[in-house]
Amino acid sequence: MRSDGYQTSQRQAIIICLSENEGSTVTVADILSFLRKNGNKANRATVYRNLERLAAEGVVLRFPTSDGQGSCFQLARLDGPDCHEHLHLKCSLCGKVIHLDCDFMEKLEHHIEENHGFSMNFGNSIIYGVCSECRQRASLEKKDK
Amino acid sequence: MRSDGYQTSQRQAIIICLSENEGSTVTVADILSFLRKNGNKANRATVYRNLERLAAEGVVLRFPTSDGQGSCFQLARLDGPDCHEHLHLKCSLCGKVIHLDCDFMEKLEHHIEENHGFSMNFGNSIIYGVCSECRQRASLEKKDK
DNA sequence: CTAGTTGCAAAGAGTTTGCATGGCG
DNA sequence: CGCCATGCAAACTCTTTGCAACTAG
């Protein structure tokens, strides 16, 4: 196993925040407000440094936010399919992340390698869109008007 | 047809810059240095405002940069497959953009709709990775060491 | 003990905004 | 000549960095 460095309270709190948001991504601002709520007032720089380290270790995934002006983070799965080997879809409305870890994924990867000569980097690529729940909700709200 | 607003020299110069880089994406910094080289010293804010307008009109695509800390832009194709209806792959090394506008794309979109209940937003999603040329070059350079 | 980690403050990149001026149509 | 676009400067957001103080192992 790799050495994960010192075990500080700040680092633990950041990982707890990520764990409690497994299904979606969090921003640095999200983490900071979570920490403040829970009594651990880690410094902004500390959060950035830990996230950078965790991302380098492959423990967390780092994606661009949908507006392209910042990053959001998510704990990589520990069990089951490796998050570095499939694409992720994120709903722009509710924030939910869908792991594209089905058989089709292999076909996609293979197709893109063979026909387009391109090897994808899954760890930092994310596709934005809208999930079915939000689409339904959006169309209902439209009707309400 | 939609009204594209006034035809200013700044706007034209920005579009020329985008045209000359059809195969890849450019950042605001790229555009500014292009403009300076070509004698048109448009203001930073003007470039941002024009790009925002062009993106809203669907004339340009806006993607996050690979480090997730800024945006890069590309002219949407005028002929052939609509760029808002397929995915884009971008090589992190050479910057080349590959349009995923083959039959497989429809299968992908259909699969994701049916099996994952998700409708993708192609206009602002991009997958980073490495193209075959750069991969070969990288492995050659490794050998040289 | 001592090397890795944190906090603080300042700096740096990228982007937006308000307002007066300028120029397209 | 009216309205939209531009330039300028300031403000804002997100992120990084240098350095002294702290602390896990």
Image (spheres, coloured by chain):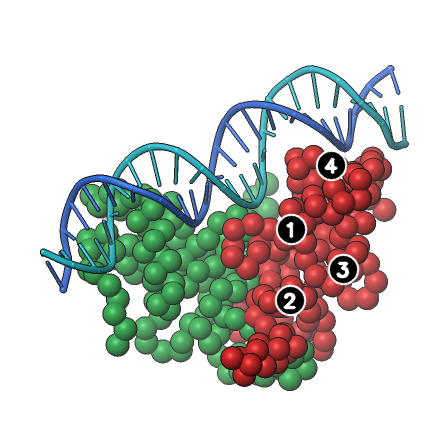
Chain colours: A red, B green, C blue, D cyan
At 80% from the left and 44% from the top, the residue drawn is: A38
Are the residues flagged by discs 4 and 3 in contact, CB closer than 8 Å?
Answer: no
Q: Chain of mark 2?
A: A
Evaluate whether residue B94 shows in this view.
no
Q: CA distance from mark 2 to mark 4?
A: 27 Å
Q: Which residue is mark 4?
A: A42
Residue at the spot 79% in from the left edge and 56% down from the top edge: A20
Residue under mark 1: which chain is it in? A
Q: Amino acid type of disc 4?
A: Ala
Q: Amino acid at mark 2?
A: Cys
- How crowded pointer 4 is (Cα within 10 Å; few <14, some 14-19, many 20+) is rated as some
Where is B43 relative to A45, above or below?
below
Which residue is at 68% across, 57% downward? A25
- Residue B142, which numbered label? none
The residue to which callout 3 is attached is A22
* Neighbourhood count class around disc 2 (C-alpha, 10 Å): few under 14, some 14–19, many 20 upward: few
**Secondary structure beneath label 3:** loop
The residue that disc 2 covers is A94
Instruction: Classify mark 1: helix, strand or loop.
Output: loop
* Chain of the residue under the numbered disc 4 shown in the image: A
Of A12 and A4, the residue lying toward us: A12
x and y percent of residue A140 in the render? Answer: 59, 81
The kind of secondary structure element at disc 2 is loop
